[in-house]
Amino acid sequence: MASTDIRLCLEPADPRGSERDDEVRRAKAGQLVEALNSRDLDWLDTLYHDDVVIHWPQSGEVIRGKHNIRKLREAYPTPPTATLGRIIGSGAL
């Protein structure tokens, strides 16, 4: 299976950034990897607003709404897995 880089942007609670904020962002990144690998669809649903729109430019597909993203994940025959290799950056970048 091909590897895909996932870029995750998590805003700090404190706009100046703090060591605690970095810990929280790193924990969230770990939770995302765990949710992908365990197919925790309920956790993955929390990433999206109800009116989200996702564009897949390689195929031209457009997925509208959290409900349709969930249905896509449920039907996907070989769901992706992830490995957290490294986290680059800290503070309010």
Image: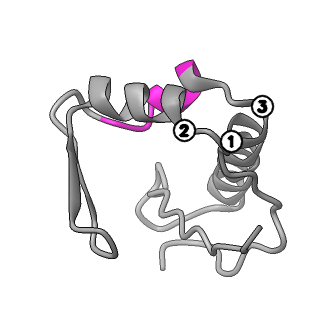
Q: Mark 2 falls on what kind of element? A: loop
For the point 52% across and 26% down, the residue is 74
Residue 13, position as x, y percentages in the image: 47, 49
User: Disc 2 vs disc 3: which is toward the camera?
Assistant: 2
Q: Residue 38 carries which label?
A: 3
Asked which quadrant contains residue 67, the reply is top left
What amino acid is at disc 2? Answer: Tyr
Residue named by callout 1:
36
Query: What label does residue 81 carry, if any?
Result: none
Which amino acid does the dot numbered 3 rest on?
A: Ser
Q: Which of marks 2 and 3 is nearer the N terminus?
A: 3
Circle 3 residues within 10 Å: few <14, some 14–19, many ≥20: few
- Indicate the amino acid at tag 1: Leu
What's drawn in magenta, residue-wise? 42-48
**Residue 34 lies within the magenta run:** no
Circle 1 SS class:
helix
Residue at image x 63%, y 75%?
A: 5
Where is residue 89 shown, x and y percent of the image? 65, 80
Confirm or deny contact between disc 1 and disc 2 (CB under 8 A).
no
Please report the residue visible at 26 percent of the width from the left and 33 percent of the height from the top. 49
Q: Is residue 32 above or below residue 43?
A: below
**In 3D space, how far apart are the residues under numbered discs 2 and 3 (Cα atoms)?**
14 Å
To which quarter of the image does residue 18 belong? bottom right
> Which residue is under mark 2?
76
Residue 41, percent across and down?
Answer: 57, 24
**For mark 2, does the 10 Å Cα neighbourhood hold few (<14), some (14 to 19), or many (20 or more) residues?**
few
Q: Is residue 54 left or right of residue 17?
A: left
Q: In this view, does 87 lie above or below 48?
A: below
Which is more N-terminal, label 2 or label 1? Answer: 1
